[in-house]
Image (spheres, rainbow, N blue to C red):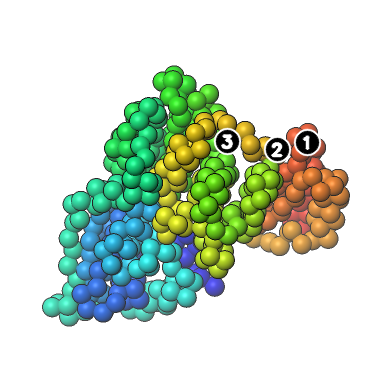
Amino acid sequence: MRKYFGTDGIRGRVGEPNISPDFVLKLGWAAGRVLGQGPGSTILIGKDTRISGYMFESALEAGLAAAGVNIRLLGPMSTPGVAYLTRTFRAAAGIVITASHNPYQDNGIKFFSADGDKLPDEVELAIEAELERPLHTVDAAALGKARRVEDAGGRYIEFCKSTIPAAMNFRGLKLVVDCAHGATYNTAPHVFEELGAEVLPMGTEPDGLNINRNVGSTSPGALCKAVVEAGADLGIAFDGDGDRVLMVNSRGAMVDGDDLLYIIARSRQTAGTLRGDVVGTLMSNLGFEHALHRLGIGFARTQVGDRYIMEHLKRTDAILGGEPSGHIICRDRTSTGDGIVAALQVLAALRRLEVSLDDLCAEVEHYPQVLINIRLPERREIVSLPAVVDAVFMAEQELAGRGRVLLRPSGTEPLVRVMVEGAEGAQVQALADRLAAVVRDQISAGAA
């Protein structure tokens, strides 16, 4: 069992025990001890635009230097940008200071291996073991040195552009690009402009406090309005650390990660480059799965979380996976979920297939899906109780193979998530409400 690491690094409220300057300093030292590859090894540090990023950057720098590791500071850089630069610098590891789509009051630390992959469990456990030991500094002559990488943004921009054919451009496209006042603010607009699109940027004025506030992929309302008002062809929304992307069509309607993944898969199939099943999660819409099957494309589900998608892709040597939230992994282009790279693959698909975003999205009929989160007074096993199991069985019988029922505990909060999906919206809502009532009754009975 991991004590500090969650499903995606370490995250929490700034100032709490695991997200404090003293803890992060020691975390840097512990990571340097485990990930450093001998004298003179280098670890990169990037961050999103939260005000606390300055503090934690300094703490990590001090801890890594104390462990004898050299540091390269990237400044504001997306999570996938750090993964890419870690590979190109032949660094021992990469670290990102970010809390992704959370508000500025939160922050966290993500790690990448030398290959640009997320760390395996055994490496995270080794770092946790070092955290339990007293911190001791290497000899003064062996201390790590820090240097800022001045051209980090330019390097990443060129990489993003290289993921589509060199002869392709987006001239004639008018795009609204929403960077969530986050880590893509100084890279994403340039990528699309340099490929010929007319770009109307928004969410590109970070002040340390406004990351994800009423903008970005988790708050797309402003982008929907801006696309319609500007008469744009489409809008693109990233989250605070740039590993998620959603789109908005010309009518101001949202296009989620399932739709975007379908478009990329369809394009890869047409080009003859699709390999293996497309991989989604338990939350991927059933209509998306059916649309892939109509094309003869296989589909596999994993637990919720992009790390599980990546594990499945690697195990089966497949190349495409993603989540409705906009985490999309194009393993034939990069080593992790990358919002800019995924958006480029969608735009390239539209050009290659000579169709509009609306045309391709019309091929995916989304089934109504209702999700109800029920808070637990404490972490308890609820979903396996006989009354809950019976209620799930009855709901599945009513759906008669034309829908899905999913009850699962949250991996990060004391919640039970009740999800029902099916062809008829009224039936789906009624079944979800009924299941939620059963779960609440069992919670109350347990409390009594």
Q: Is residue 168 left or right of residue 142?
A: right
Above or below, comparing residue 115 to residue 323 in the picture: below
Please give the name of the residue rendered at 46% of the width and 58% of the height, measured from the top-left corner.
331
Residue 368, label in figure: 2
Please give the name of the residue rendered at 33% of the width and 49% of the height, measured from the top-left corner.
162
Circle 3 packing at 10 Å, graded few (<14), some (14-19), many (20+), is some
- Contact? badges 3 and 1 (CB < 8 Å): no
Q: Which residue is mark 3?
A: 360
Q: Secondary structure at mark 3?
A: helix
Q: Secondary structure at mark 1?
A: loop
Residue 424, label in figure: 1
Q: Is residue 293 left or right of residue 138?
A: right
Whichever of callouts 1 and 2 sits on the residue coming sooner in the sequence is 2
Residue 259 appears anywhere in the view: yes
Quadrant where the C terminus is found in the figure? bottom right
**Residue at mark 3 to residue at mark 1: CA–CA distance:** 23 Å
**Residue at mark 1 to residue at mark 2: CA–CA distance:** 7 Å
